[in-house]
Image (cartoon, rainbow, N blue to C red):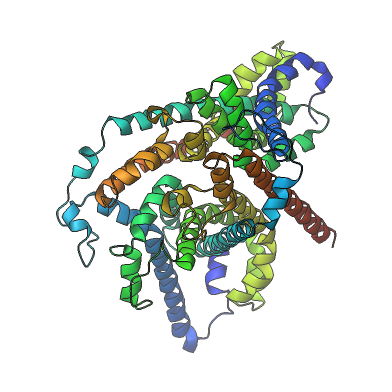
Amino acid sequence: MGFSPRQAPVFLAAIFAPSILLVGLFIVYPVVNSVGLAFTDASPLSSGRSFVGLENFVYLLEDGEFWEVLWNTVFIVGAATIIATACGYGLATLLISGIRAAAIFRAAIFQVWVVPWIVIAILWGWLFSQDYGLVNYLLMQVGLIETPVKWMFDQKASQWAIISGYAWRAIPFIMVICLAALQGIPSELVESAAIDGASFLQRQRYVILPLMQNIIMVAALLQAVRFFQEMTMIFVLTQGGPINATMVLSLYTYKTAFEDWDFGLASAIGTVWLILLMAFALLYVRVALRRNLA
Amino acid sequence: MNAEALRTGSKPLPRRRSEVVYRLSRLATSISLHALVVASLAILLLPIVWMLSTSFKPLADVFSYPPQFIPRNPTVESYTTQFTGLLGRYFLNSVIVGLLSAILATGAGALAAYGLSRYRLPGRNAILMFFMASLAFPIPLLMISMYLMFVQLGLLNTYIGLVIGHTVITLPVCVWLLKNFFDQLPVEVEEAAFVDGASRAYTLFRIVLPMARPALGASAIFVFVTSWNELLFGLTFVSSTSMRPLPAGISMSFLTEFEGAWSEMMALSVMVSLPIFLLFTVFQRTFMSGVTAGAVKG
């Protein structure tokens, strides 16, 4: 269906012009140009730039720091995505289980999604403050720890402080998507399973989860993509420290480019990042296709 | 029905002896479910409650032990005294950049989305896939070349530079969102307009876009919120203090100035969150209403 483009070439050119201009000038050109810069020693501090071949890439792959950053990114983004998805799905299941005032609960939880990242960064600094922070106080009250944790000065602890912030912020998004999908499951399916004697867990495992699998995957992936880009919390709280424990790809590229002013190396990092993304996308499409065929 | 079945299971009719047990277990399940929801809600909202609570405390009470959840000596001092003209300027910058980005991204996105939805274009799916994929592009990689361009064009330290940055990272979502909306809009409305002799531009601007108001609103709010959140462009494309949007301005000037002054920092946090909170609260209903009603009336 739809109109033939031949009927209105001028009209079509006019309505596509703004976005073609924006995308061409400020997405396609910068990406292509930056990938080109990765093979140079470009820097805004020096006027000339020369071709250095694969030097930046060789440096990067031989440098232990890059692999460390890559692993940190995968760990922080992965852990936050898994936690947010599990909690978001769990909450959606709870809210649909016939409790009273579910709409009010949903609206209240949704408020978390409204909090800007810069606010989360400041707020987490206060919550995880070593001496007066609420988190240390509560953990000590419950008896999980005996002395206050130095959240921002311990490598593992700082990673978990960041992960908790990421996960907290993403829970409402996952919850809203899961809730919508859960409401779309025909009630006859679940009821007939119940009549056949399936317990709550069995219904989850054999009826609901298989139906939800795809939508959960999509929601988690979207969230992971956003986490990859996000760096406000880390920039404000730790600057990537202590000893690079919270240094993630986005902050690492940013710092290399705009603090060290090494555009060549930063472009190389960004290019590797882009290649990894494409590899992952190809892999994902393959797996998804195979599953659909099976 | 669904929910009922999920909670209790439709067991065969209980015999009289076990009916009491059955009812009791149902009640217990219900109570524990409610308790679970309330507990999760308490944990999730604790950071927000703590932020509000701290913001209304005088400095002496901020560090009290055990912590006070309800301020014993509430004061609004932190909201009024500390932040001077600079904060107002950051707010203004963020509002201007957010509004302009919302208009540009939603406008350009709506036009392209309409074309993609209504015309049999070659490579239509490839274009949509590209838009989706571009969401994952490393933003710092884009920024390196954009920075060099903006130096040449003299767009550093301007609203235009920031608006362009915020527009290109949100445009793909706008196109997707609006295309989905146009796909659901009945094409008969436009065909009727064409039969009546309306031009394509007239039909788009006077008939289709007014019907798309809720979707346009959703798209604009998405862009504004993303822009409000965005730190990177504000850090790199702006070097003069007075041109910084909120996140960049706060992280460059207030963080060190107010280090340890948690009631002020929390008051600041509340103020920065408030516009987004209001935006969502006020426009939640507008989204839902009149999506199809508009088509019938028009």
Q: Residue at x 31, y 56 (%)?
A: B50
Q: Quadrant of the C terminus of chain A?
A: bottom right
Taking depth in this image into account, of B248 and A77 the one nearest to the observer is B248
Residue lying at the far bottom of the rendered structure: B17
User: Residue A102: image x %, image y %?
Assistant: 45, 58
Q: Quadrant of the N terminus of chain A?
A: top right
**Place of residue A10 in the rendered image (x, y in percent of width and height, measured from the top left):** 76, 14
On the question of residue A235 being in view, the answer is yes
- In the rendered image, the residue lying farthest to the left is B73
Q: Is residue A283 above or below residue B273?
A: below
Q: How many marks?
A: 0
**Residue A61 appears at what percent x and percent y?**
70, 55
In terms of image quadrants, where is residue B5?
bottom right
**Which residue is at the front of the view, B284 or B98?**
B98
Give the residue drawn at x 53%, y 65%.
A90
- Viewed as shown, does residue A7 lie left or right of B79? right
Residue A247, above or below B150: below
Residue positioned 60% across, 54% down in the render: A224
> In the displayed image of the protein, which residue is found farthest to the top?
B197
Image position, residue A89 (x, y; %): 56, 62
Residue visible at 74% across and 18% down in the picture: A13
Say if B27 sits above or below B232 in the image: below
Residue B298 in sight from this viewpoint: no
